[in-house]
Image (cartoon, helix red, strand yellow):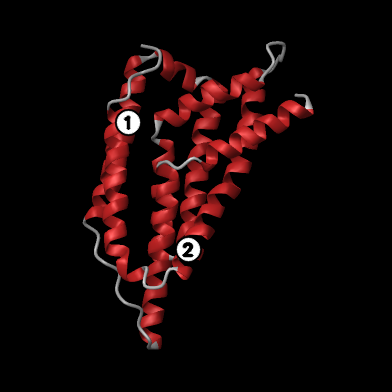
Amino acid sequence: MPLDQLLLFMAAGLLLNLTPGPDVLYIISQSLRHGLRAGLMAALGITAGCFVHIFAAAVGVSALMLASATAFTLLKWLGAGYLVYVGTRMLFSRAPMAASGDAAGVQAKTAAGAGALKTIFLRGFWTNALNPKVALFFLAFLPQFIAPTVEHKPLAFLLLGLLFNFNAVWVNLGWAVAAVWLAQKAGGLQARMHWLDRAAGTLFIAFGCKLAFTDNPAS
């Protein structure tokens, strides 16, 4: 790929990753509620889920899903159901406890946060991996930067997908850092997390409903 095409690909990927959606919302909500480590784990989970779509596009699974109404519908409803599930958990989550000044309270809070990091990572992974719109995005976006004369198109898909995800991970981590910075600047934000969770949960359910009524582009 010529250098100008490569730079165009990276710039387009950067702009696309900066666009808010379920992934960004999940990273921000976890960062605001649980702190920087949770936000970083959410970002890494989202990035890991993206690898599923990259490898699927490389081996042609995404193309199969685009052509098969059954495959698209199945993944669509799985993804929509999972987004609604995550949103419902946010809606009915408990308000975070006020920070305790004693050492025992701080240790308990730290231990609980460490135990939840794996769950935060996995939820981020499935939020991305079960979204068929991400798979179709790779199928529509990457071929624009692959010349028709390229012999090994699956390898080209894979390399461009890995480059896209490498750039995306820094954007995702940046969202986490920015959210924590905002929380530190806005005093008393922790006390309002109860309402922020409700708003994020409502948006996740809305994303899920929107996905559920998305038609297969091939139909």
Residue labelled with disc 2: 182
Q: Quadrant of residue 76?
A: top left
Q: Determine the secondary structure under disc 1.
A: helix
Residue 47 in the image, given as x and y percentages of width and height:
52, 44
Q: Is residue 82 visible?
A: no
Query: Does 102 sit left or right of 167 as displayed?
Result: left
Amino acid beneath label 2: Leu
Q: Is residue 175 visible?
A: yes
Q: Which numbered circle lies on residue 105? A: none
Q: Determine the secondary structure under disc 2.
A: helix
Q: Is residue 137 above or below residue 66?
A: below
Q: Quadrant of residue 58?
A: top right
Residue 96 in the image, given as x and y percentages of width and height:
30, 69
**Foreground disc of the pair 1, 2:** 2
Q: Which numbered circle lies on residue 211? A: 1
Residue 151 in the image, given as x and y percentages of width and height:
71, 14
At horizontal 40% and vertical 65% (from top left) the residue drawn is 34
Q: Is residue 116 above or below residue 26?
A: below
At horizontal 32% and vertical 17% (from top left) the residue drawn is 70
Amino acid beneath label 1: Leu
Viewer-proximal residue among 189 and 47: 189
Q: Is residue 142 above or below residue 162?
A: above
At horizontal 21% and vertical 56% (from top left) the residue drawn is 92
Query: Does 113 sit left or right of 8 as displayed?
Result: left
Viewer-proximal residue among 106 and 186: 186
Mark 2: few, some, or many residues within 10 Å (few <14, many ≥20)?
few
